[in-house]
Amino acid sequence: MPETEFNTYTYLSEEDKQAQFERGKAGYERGDYDKAIEFLRKPAMQDHIEAQFYLGRAYTQQRFYELAIRWLTKAAKQKHPKAQYYLGEAYFYGKGVVLDYNQALKLYQEAAVQGDKDAEKKLDNEDELDKINLITTQESAQAKEYSRLANQENLKAKYNLATAFNRGKGVLEDHIRAKDLWREAAELGHTESQYRLGLIYYEDTSVDDEKAIELWHKAAEQGHIDAQYRLGKHYYENEKLINTQAVNWWQKAAELGHTDAQYYLGNAYYNGWDTEKPIQDQAIEWWKKAAEQGHIIAQYNLGVVCRKAKDNQNALQYFDRVANTVQRNALVISAQYLLGIMYKKGEGCSQNYQKARVWLKQTTGFEKGIENVNLSENDRDFLKVVLDEENIQEELITIVQISAQQALEDIAKLEEQEKANQELENMMGLIAHKFRGSIQVISYNAQNENQPSISLDSVETMRGLFEIFGIISTRSENLCEKLIQDKEGEGTILTTLEKSLSLALTDLLIEDNRNKISQHYIAYAKVNKGLDINVTLRQWRRKQEYLVLWKQLQTQWQNTFMLASKKFDWVQAHLFPLEIATFDDNVIHFEHYGMTESILVIAMTEIILNAIKYYSVQENTTVKIGWKIQPDFCIFSCENPYSENESKRSDKGSRKGQIFLETISKKLGGHFSKVVSQNHYIAELKIPTHLLIEEKYEPILMG
């Protein structure tokens, strides 16, 4: 009982004082703290040091901490070692006083000097002392404030101080002290403490679950949503009362926004718990609420339900959210597998083998034995119903991984076939494109009775394209053999370059292609035809007076180029400065219009076309065309100033030629590369040296 103030009291003789102390001490030792306090109080008030100590301890046992501190302090001031030790404990744990490690250590030291073994043991605990030194000032100050308020029966402060002890924040970690503080707050009606103490009891196998359930009921009835959810889970898992109590508590918690309760309530409606039959719409509604708060099982369930209903777009979105979670568990594997399959089949999206491969590889990358998602046995039974998917059964992880590996192999075969089809399609596209240009050249020459040699070159280019296409589409391995066999004749690299340049410009200078090199026409007109330097490309293309000049220039250029005997000089006079490097070697020979020349002409023509189309007239620097022979590769290169604006224009072409260059170089065992660096475009075609030069020849580095 709490101590009351006495204005007067009966003075005891030394004999009576000692007698009452002995009776009080006996009551303390047998656990009768009320009787102990009754007999200890008077001798304590008359400065009996042992009575003061035992009175303080009796009040401590009855949790009257303020009175306990009062009497322990009196005894400690009189050098009572055990009183000093227990007063130190009070400061150490914040019982009845504001938590203060420095004051506690001081009292331990005073007790230890007098030989108190408990105090000595406390001071010898170096690990504990080191931890005290590591506590930050801010955390310590916060814990002291919690301690001060807790001693004033502030329930939230008691809860916070308990949490601090439980986590070791600002105080030394002490789960027993945390549990005591939560119990004190719970008994005074603090709902969060009731819930937390319930968790401790529920997880403690030595404590009857009913204690936890009783505490959760008290908290749940005051609207504590975690307690409501836990009650539902308890009745669901342990008592199998899923038809009434579990659903009722989940309903309360779900309506207050509890994610897991929303998920389980969705399960209840899906399975028809506490309803006459399953209500799928209600299940989906609650799963959606849980999914929006990041519940991955709800997200997965929604994905499965949507896919069953052929709502593949939404299914894809839900599986994507699960697959991208940081957790590693069976549901994540399943979601990744299903994403891979859906991208492979084009379900809810465009068919995308690349994305399918990414997800399926992640699926196969998981090792067996990874953590399971936190599911109860009943949850797992439920998932066996929901996961009614082909290849997803009891051995979920293993089977999904095997299925994913098979799907990856299927994708590889499909991609290989699509790649082959794409190569043929690109080749056919290039042939159609080149045929159109060649036919236009032949038509123009026939109408204007121009040089027949150019028409012949165009015809042979068409024939070479047909032959290359025939070899690649049926016997691609024979292409290299054709080049090896074609190492004699009148054809050289320089004559091939001249032919390629002629074909490229003949193609670009026809009327239908003038838009592709409009920047060259306007630049030439500004320098040579008096065109205002401020005229923009947009104006050049739209105003009638400029269109007339443009048409005149196109006709003039087409005629003069056809008649020019020195094509390189014409280029420098009309388009840009040109530098031809190391083409005068006499090492490589091949038949005119043979396989080697056909490939080189088509490749060089395409590279030169791009250099002209994407040339930056603002830079107006030299285009460098080179050929060099190295031990492994012969390299044709073209470097030119590059305009990003020109590259973005849709009228420049289909870019199928570049795809052809990549395809043909790969078939030959070479490589085609293009690099944009500091407004310069560099294209390189590498062809294995042994395909062009006899092996007896020792290549010379040139450049």
Image (cartoon, helix red, strand yellow):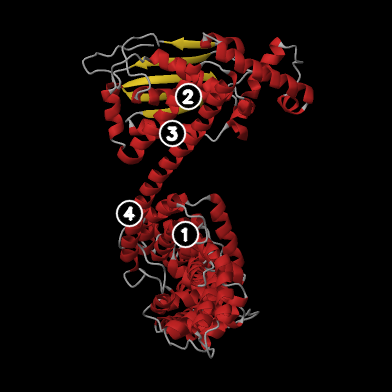
Residue at mark 3 to residue at mark 2: CA–CA distance: 18 Å
**Label 1, residues with CA under 10 Å away: few <14, some 14-19, many ≥20:** some
Q: Which mark is residue 561?
A: none
Foreground: disc 1 or disc 3: 3
Q: Which one is earlier in the sequence, the residue at label 2 or at label 4?
A: 4
**Amino acid under disc 1:** Gly
Q: Which one is earlier in the sequence, the residue at label 3 or at label 4?
A: 4
Regarding residue 501, the answer to whether it shows in the image is: no
In the foreground, 199 or 139? 199
**Mark 2 = which residue?**
458
Residue at the image position 49 percent from the left and 14 percent from the top: 624
Give above or below for 561 relative to 9: above
- Hey, which quadrant is residue 141 in on the image? bottom right
**Mark 1 = which residue?**
168
Q: Is residue 689 left or right of residue 71?
A: left
Residue at mark 2 to residue at mark 1: CA–CA distance: 86 Å
**Amino acid under disc 2:** Ser
Q: Position of residue 399 (x, y in %)?
A: 32, 65
Give above or below for 417 relative to 282: above
Q: Which one is earlier in the sequence, the residue at label 1 or at label 3?
A: 1
Q: Disc 2, disc 4: CB below 8 Å?
A: no
Q: Secondary structure at mark 1?
A: loop
